[in-house]
């Protein structure tokens, strides 16, 4: 899609969506009172108020749905461990949109009907596996909808059915590698050629490690349930310049998490999404909690003319502020992974303690890197291999004491 066409579609769909939510959702009627919606364009969208996770909680079960219940074909649920669940309803058209967006990802990654696609995120209320499934099914690929867990079985299926594409959370390949080795295989013995990894931030260093271990190519696939699930909002640039965000479906802004001010290119902040091609519950200026920055708006060298964001660095809730330093777990991961350490845990209390599975001999180097690159002086605790908890879904590596 050419830039000019993207702008045109964006403008038209935003106009339509604003009118649509105003007419069909009481929440937005209240939010937009006193605002002349005809004057709102993608350039002036910051005049509209934000929608927050709290708004979605208050809307439980379906208060923010723009369609009658008969038009809803499924629901998914978003994260958050306490309080009311956050429910996202879908119409048939929304399910189609989800599928279409994942199909774009498949096309960029060169995934076709010849592939054997093993889908390891969960099939359940958390949106995990379904988007991959809808797209893989649509291209008549060989689908293994195995879902989460039972890593030994996952490996057996990879070998027996010749899995070429693995869909997973970003930390899961590490677990697969470990179990494969226990079973007497090298991870590179597995037939997997491509991995679509998402649902949690992962560093370039971790990518390098995974690609070397498996001799496979990895792709970052972002997405959140509130915007329709994994794979809806964008996909990684094939030249690895960042994430291309599908602007004909979402308007993406980056704002200062404290003040809510819109930030420009190259300024790190919180991603705010407006869904302009969804039906059951299109959200306007939704504060995602994801941290990134805009790399460029213009055409990328890969030929894609949608905007480019940096890969997601973390979540605003995961930011650690300690003795003047401000960082994310992914900053710690980057340093550790560069020494081949992929199993770790960060404990934040009055001091910072990092537990890791590695060798004592690298501690001086690690301490130096933590001081230099993050500005912290954590207590480093070396544990023997296999001590820390392993994860088959999203990894939980940050503990606040
Ligand atoms: Zn690109």
Image (cartoon, rainbow, N blue to C red):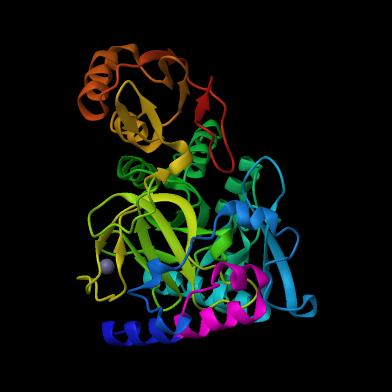
Residue 80, given in percent of the width and then of the height, sits at 62, 44
Q: Please check the rendered image and state whether residue 253 is part of the magenta-colored stretch, yes or no.
A: no
Residue 17, given in percent of the width and then of the height, sits at 53, 80
Residue 240 seen in this snapshot: no
Q: Main secondary structure of the magenta part?
A: helix
Residue 4, given in percent of the width and then of the height, sits at 27, 86
Ligand 1 positioned in quadrant? bottom left
Query: Which residue appears at 29% of the width and 14% of the height?
Result: 363
Quadrant (top left, top right, bottom left, bottom right) of the C terminus: top right
Along the viewing direction, whichever of 143 and 39 lies nearer the viewer: 39
Query: Which residue appears at 38% of the width and 42% of the height?
Result: 213
Magenta-colored span: 13-36
- In this rendering, the answer to whether 395 lies above or below 22 is above
Query: Which residue appears at 71% of the width and 78% of the height?
Result: 67
Along the viewing direction, whichever of 195 and 312 lies nearer the viewer: 312
Residue 84 seen in this snapshot: yes
Query: Which residue appears at 42% of the width and 17% of the height?
Result: 353
Along the viewing direction, whichever of 114 and 270 lies nearer the viewer: 270
Residue 29, given in percent of the width and then of the height, sits at 61, 73
- In this rendering, the answer to whether 324 lies above or below 293 is above
- In this rendering, the answer to whether 191 lies above or below 347 is below
């Amino acid at each position: 899609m050419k830039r000019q066409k993207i702008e045109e579609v964006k403008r038209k769909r935003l106009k339509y969506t604003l009118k649509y939510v105003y007419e069909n959702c009481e929440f937005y009627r209240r939010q937009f009172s006193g605002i002349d919606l005809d004057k709102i364009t993608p350039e002036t969208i910051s005049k509209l108020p934000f929608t927050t996770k709290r708004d979605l909680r208050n809307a439980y079960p379906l208060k923010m749905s723009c369609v009658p219940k008969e038009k809803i074909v499924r629901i998914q649920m978003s994260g958050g461990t306490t309080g009311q669940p956050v429910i996202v309803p879908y119409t048939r058209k929304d399910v189609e949109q989800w599928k279409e967006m994942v199909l774009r990802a498949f096309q960029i990654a060169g995934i076709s009907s010849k592939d054997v696609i093993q889908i390891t995120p969960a099939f359940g209320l958390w949106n995990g596996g379904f988007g991959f499934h809808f797209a893989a099914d649509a291209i008549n690929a060989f689908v293994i909808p195995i879902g989460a867990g039972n890593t030994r079985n996952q490996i057996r299926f990879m070998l027996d059915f010749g899995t070429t594409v693995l869909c997973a959370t970003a930390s899961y390949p590490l677990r697969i590698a470990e179990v494969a080795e226990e079973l007497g295989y090298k991870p590179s013995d597995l037939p997997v050629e491509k991995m679509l990894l998402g649902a949690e931030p992962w560093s370039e260093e971790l990518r390098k490690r995974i690609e070397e271990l498996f001799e496979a190519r990895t792709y970052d696939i972002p997405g959140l349930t509130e915007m329709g699930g994994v794979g809806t909002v964008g996909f990684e640039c094939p030249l690895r310049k960042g994430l291309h965000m599908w602007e004909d479906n979402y308007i993406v802004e980056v704002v200062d998490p404290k003040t809510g001010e819109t930030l420009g290119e190259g300024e790190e902040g919180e991603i705010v999404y407006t869904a302009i091609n969804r039906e059951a519950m299109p959200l306007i200026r939704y504060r995602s909690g994801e941290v990134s920055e805009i790399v460029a708006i213009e055409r990328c060298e890969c030929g894609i003319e949608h905007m480019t964001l940096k890969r997601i660095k973390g979540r605003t809730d995961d930011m650690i502020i300690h003795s003047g330093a401000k960082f994310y777990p992914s900053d710690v991961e980057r340093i550790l992974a560069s020494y081949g350490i992929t199993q770790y845990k960060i404990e934040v209390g009055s001091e910072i303690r990092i537990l890791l599975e590695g060798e004592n001999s690298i501690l001086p180097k690690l301490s130096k890197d933590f001081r230099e690159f993050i500005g912290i002086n954590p207590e480093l605790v070396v544990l023997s291999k296999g001590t820390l908890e392993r994860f088959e879904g999203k990894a939980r590596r940050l503990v606040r004491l």
